[in-house]
Image (tube, grey):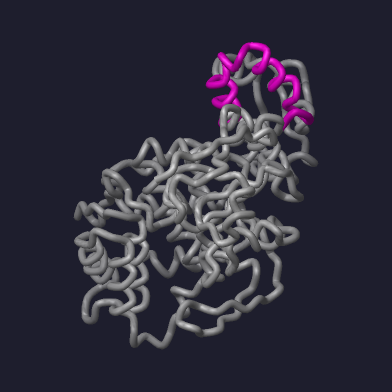
């Protein structure tokens, strides 16, 4: 493999240089980022507070609270940011106004933009891929697409866009893919049965097998157990996909596996497990804080956006069309690898990108899916966070449908 040529990501270094956190970021730069951990911790606490602002009882910060004083207000520039984000200073306490509470997701995006710029302050983008197929943990400069428009690795266009002020990462191959081999594997438990999966794709395919071709004559949780046991024996993602394809080949009704809410819910659980259990992958995902993630799969308009990175990054209004909060109802057509033409709504595409962003948000909120965690507990943790995020997709129907299986 060739050594990558690297270039500074100047957009990342400058991101968040204005707005509510300008003073905090300037103070960090002056201190040569010695207090960056404290700043990122404060941003994490602020994210939780904002996401819980729908509850009026959770809108107040009391200065006398030792944790508020030590972990939030003592961080340089954070109190000034709170005021600009819509908190009102009442002397002994700070309270989120009703207007700010009604638009917390914009405030969270502002926090993520600032925190993400700190996480990426030393980021360099690869100008020449070390792997021509993109199977590396590098984030690549969009210039790689000039020489190879079909490049499949993770490409980071850090130009601010509407709905994506920290930019966009488009990927097909990379650690963000479910095909990426997980070093120590993904380990979960299902009703006390502990299983290890070589890739996150294997866990995903177990749910596909169970939903489309459940084992006959047994309760739903035993059917899922059968599929999990099968997939746990498989070493490669390609084989996992093929085994699931053979098991479901004669299925005519794809209602539930084609359901966007199922994709987002199951995908988020799988991504949370994968990125929680590997410290390197966890750091990589958190380094994308605030960035819009797009799965650039040319032949997949359900998990991806039915376009390669070159086309996807040129698309207008990416966040409005394929982002976490998309309600864009325009249909689009795409051709699968088998040559079949499918039609899907834009708001029901990019399920893997959304699942990664949900998992990222959950980890930022302190949710961890440790090795051997019960699947039912992992689903419950993700469902709690989906409620806080208030996503517009119908993941609740998926949760209800899977309840007996877990």
Q: Nearer the viewer, residue 70 or 211?
A: 211
Q: Quadrant of residue 215?
A: bottom left
Residue drawn 77% across the image and 21% down it:
90
Residue 353: x percent and y percent?
Answer: 54, 56
Whether residue 214 sits left or right of residue 300 in the image: it is left
Look at the image and tell me whether residue 104 can be seen.
no
Q: Nearer the viewer, residue 406 or 337?
A: 337
Q: Residue furthest top?
A: 31
Residue drawn 50% across the image and 46% down it:
129
Residue 14: x percent and y percent?
Answer: 71, 30
Relative to 222, residue 69 above or below: above
Whether residue 388 sits left or right of residue 178 in the image: it is right
Q: Is residue 36 magenta?
A: yes
Magenta: predominant secondary structure element? helix
Look at the image and tell me whether residue 8 can be seen.
yes
Span highlighted in magenta in the image: 16-44
Residue 203: x percent and y percent?
Answer: 33, 60
Residue 16: x percent and y percent?
Answer: 72, 32
Q: Is residue 316 magenta?
A: no
Name the quarter where the N terminus is drawn: top left
């Amino acid at each position: 493999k060739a050594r990558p040529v690297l270039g500074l990501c100047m957009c990342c270094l400058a991101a968040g240089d204005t707005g509510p956190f300008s003073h905090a970021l300037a103070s960090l730069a002056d201190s040569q980022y010695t207090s960056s951990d404290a700043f990122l911790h404060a941003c994490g606490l602020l994210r939780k507070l904002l996401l819980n602002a729908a509850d009026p009882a959770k809108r107040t910060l009391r200065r006398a609270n030792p944790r508020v004083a030590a972990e939030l207000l003592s961080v340089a520039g954070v109190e000034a940011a709170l005021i600009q984000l819509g908190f009102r200073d009442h002397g002994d306490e700070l309270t989120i106004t009703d207007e700010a509470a009604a638009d917390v997701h914009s405030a969270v995006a502002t926090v993520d933009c600032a925190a993400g710029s700190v996480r990426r302050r030393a980021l360099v983008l690869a100008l020449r891929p070390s792997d021509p197929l993109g199977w590396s943990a590098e984030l690549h400069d969009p210039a790689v697409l000039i020489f190879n428009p079909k490049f499949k690795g993770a490409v980071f266009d850090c130009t601010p866009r509407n709905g994506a002020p920290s930019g966009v990462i488009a990927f097909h191959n990379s650690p963000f893919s479910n095909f990426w081999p997980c070093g120590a594997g993904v380990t979960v438990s299902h009703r006390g049965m502990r299983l290890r999966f070589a890739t996150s794709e294997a866990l995903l395919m177990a749910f596909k097998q169970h939903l489309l071709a459940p084992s006959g004559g047994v309760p739903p949780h035993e059917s899922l157990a059968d599929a999990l046991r099968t997939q746990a024996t498989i070493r490669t993602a390609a084989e996992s996909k093929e085994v699931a394809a053979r098991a479901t080949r004669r299925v005519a009704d794809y209602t539930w596996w084609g359901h966007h809410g199922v994709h987002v819910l199951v995908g988020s659980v799988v991504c949370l497990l994968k990125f929680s259990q590997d410290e390197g992958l966890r750091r990589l995902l958190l380094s994308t804080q605030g960035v819009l993630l797009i799965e650039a799969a040319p032949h997949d308009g359900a998990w991806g956006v039915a376009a390669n990175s070159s086309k996807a990054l040129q698309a207008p209004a990416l966040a409005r069309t394929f982002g976490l909060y998309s309600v864009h109802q325009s249909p689009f057509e795409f051709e699968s690898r088998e040559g079949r033409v499918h039609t899907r709504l834009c708001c029901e595409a990019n399920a893997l990108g959304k699942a990664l962003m949900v998992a990222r948000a959950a980890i930022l909120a302190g949710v961890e899916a440790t090795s051997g965690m019960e699947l039912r507990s992992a689903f419950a943790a993700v469902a709690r966070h989906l409620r806080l995020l208030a996503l517009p997709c119908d993941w609740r129907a998926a949760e209800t449908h899977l309840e007996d299986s877990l």
